Amino acid sequence: MDTFSDSLLRLARNYLGVAIEQYSAFQEQIRPGPTRVDHHSGRVWIGDREFAGSGEIGTYAEDLSFMWAWAKPALDGLPGVAASTRMRELGLRHGIPEFAQGIVDLSGFPDPMLAADHLSIIALGALGGRGMTKFNHGGRAYAYLIVDDEQVPCAAPDPGVVAGVVRAAAHMLPGAGARAVVAGYAHHHHAPLRDTADGVEVQLPDGLRLVVRIDDGDRLVDAEVVGPGHGAVAAADPMPRHERIPPFFPDSLLVALAPAAATTVGGHGSLRGAAAAAAVPTLRWQPMYGDDDVVDAPHRPVAVAEIGRYDSEHRIWAWAPQDWTGTAALRRLACEHGAEHLALDRVDLGTTVHPDNVVTMLVAGAADLGGTVGWAAVPGGAGWRYFAVVDDAVTSTGSDPGVAAQLIETAANLLHPLTDPHSRYPTMRAMVVGYFDRYRVTTLTFGEPQMLLGHFGLYEMRVEFDATGGIVGTRTGMIGELMS
């Protein structure tokens, strides 16, 4: 599908303005923070706030689909998916396929993740919930959570944002139906509604009026709030940005390291024949991507240099004491970008949401800065020991569109959880262009920020981005055929 069904749009128009208003109020009231859900108790935690009567409504996956929580067998009947189950009941009652089907294919939408966001806000309105949030749970996937705890107040009409709320609701739903959007908003707030020569008016408290102009096709032209003296009230953004959580990787550092995520992931492998506690001067090398000929591996022991160790139980990263060239370069680079905490001998990852991604970026960055093409891990203590393959006999064999697509998608899954909309596109762009530059692939940027293209002789690869700067996916083919 490339748009929502008529049955969904008809239902959503009745309450979407209220849903956007409540979502905006929730964003203003609740500070961002590490987020988790307990399906068994129906509780959600955002930062240091705990909310009862809440849970998961669904998840958005890398394959550009949305899966309702009620459709996951492991969650069947749990309190944390009760709201999602109500969405299925609504779908069956009103003939709405997007609610009644367990998996909704969003790949035909211009921006599939934005479509998932819209579907979740529509669900918030249908459920009459107090708030909705999403959090990254790995790769480019997100879980959407509904909050219905009474400690979150219901939103009241705000003269500064109500016009923006109505405009956002009308524009979110394609086609006609602007009158239904305004009428639904007025009905929810028990506000008088009357027709005018060119639209409708809603009477707000304190003598204020929401004046909405609608064309003959029932499409919204404009909306504004006016006072008793007919002067317009200054409007604000109905969906303000959250206060940003300080990133563990400063944006500039992540942009600098992003190419390493793609250029070294092809050399990610394993080392054979190693005792966990032993010194590891030479080991057998087994590249993970050997079937794609990304790394040419000799059939003999190879020289390695230890990068560091990760204690997964205590979530502590420790740089190797010998201070190999690549690790020294990365620690200097971290200091240059204001990330001295990453240059310490021991780095505490206890407060990070995705510590494994942080460790992988440190290892990949060190391997790349050290001029190697491969890195690997072996079990050690309560976690893992990481090594760079420094043997000259291990060499890169180049790239082609198929290999590039696989590695760029893998790198996107690694980087995405470490970014937010403030930094995502510059980071992802640096990763893609850095990979192309490494293999001397011609980069075409005329489609930015929606896409980047790489030319491999007669073939090309298109890397497509969503509205937040995340990588939607890649496509490969003969030059020119992807434009059709």
Image (spheres, rainbow, N blue to C red):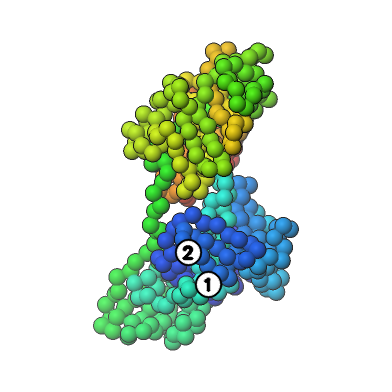
Which three-letter amino acid code belongs to the residue tagged 2? Arg
Amino acid carrying mark 1 in the image:
Asp
Q: Residue 116 appears at what percent x and percent y?
A: 57, 57
**Would you say residue 228 is visible in this rendering?**
yes
Residue 183 seen = no
Which residue is at 60% across, 53% downward? 60
Q: Which residue lies under the disc numbered 2? A: 49
How many marks overall?
2
Q: Earlier in the sequence, mark 2 or mark 1?
A: 2
Nearer to the camera, 391 or 317 = 317
Looking at the picture, does residue 185 appear above or below residue 359?
Answer: below
Residue under label 1: 149
User: What mark, if any, has residue 84 been given in the picture?
Assistant: none
**Secondary structure under the numbered disc 2 in the rendered image:** strand
Secondary structure type for disc 1? loop
> Relative to residue 208, is residue 416 drawn left or right?
right
Q: Nearer the viewer, residue 252 or 228?
A: 252
In this rendering, the answer to whether 206 lies above or below 246 is below
User: What residue is drawn where x is 44% and y is 58%?
Assistant: 32
| Residue at (52% x, 45% y) in the render | 354
Q: CA distance from mark 2 to mark 1?
A: 11 Å
